[in-house]
Image (tube, rainbow, N blue to C red):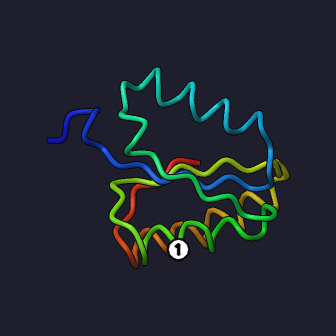
Amino acid sequence: MLAASEIRIGVVIAGDSVIDDVVVAHFVKLAGLNPSNISIKHVPNDTQVVMGVLFFAEYTDVDGVVVIANQAGPDWLICMQKALYDLQIQWRLILTI
């Protein structure tokens, strides 16, 4: 099992929000993660979240992916979860929404 300081995390942030970057920094501090092991990928909007996750799956060697999205509607969430679950199965990813 990896120690918290060894875990590599990819973070997909929908939209360019400074607040979201602050949330990620706080998350890193609370979890005891090494900031140099955190990769952040900004995507233009919530509809591009799956492409951001796919980027981490194909081009990086992260241990897990965290998604920060602004959309909160139940229809969007169901569609997004289905797409992300499909990626989890295909790439054996660990995702947190």
Q: In which quarter of the image is residue 52?
A: bottom right
Query: Which residue is painted at 47% across and 67% down in the image?
Result: 56
Q: Is residue 72 left or right of residue 60?
A: right
Q: Is residue 77 above or below residue 66?
A: below
Q: Whole-percent x and y of residue 69?
A: 73, 50
Question: Which is nearer the eye, 21 or 67?
Answer: 21
Q: In this view, does 34 lie above or below 42?
A: above
Q: In this view, does 3 lie above or below 90?
A: above
Q: Residue furthest left?
A: 1
Q: In this view, does 16 lie to the left or right of 65?
A: right
Q: In this view, does 64 lie above or below 21?
A: below
Query: Which residue is painted at 28% across and 33% down in the image?
Result: 4
Q: Whole-percent x and y of residue 32?
A: 36, 24
Q: In this view, does 90 lie to the left or right of 85?
A: left
Query: Which residue is painted at 83% across and 52% down in the image?
Result: 71
Query: Which residue is painted at 53% across and 29% down in the image?
Result: 27
Disc 1 marks which residue? 54
Label 1 element class: helix
Q: Quadrant of residue 25?
A: top right
Q: In which quarter of the image is residue 38?
A: top left
Q: How many dots with numbers?
A: 1
Query: Quick one: label 1, few (<14), some, or many (20+) residues within 10 Å?
Result: some
The amino acid pointed to by label 1 is Leu
Q: Residue furthest front?
A: 36
In which quadrant is the N terminus drawn? top left
Q: Whole-percent x and y of residue 17?
A: 80, 43
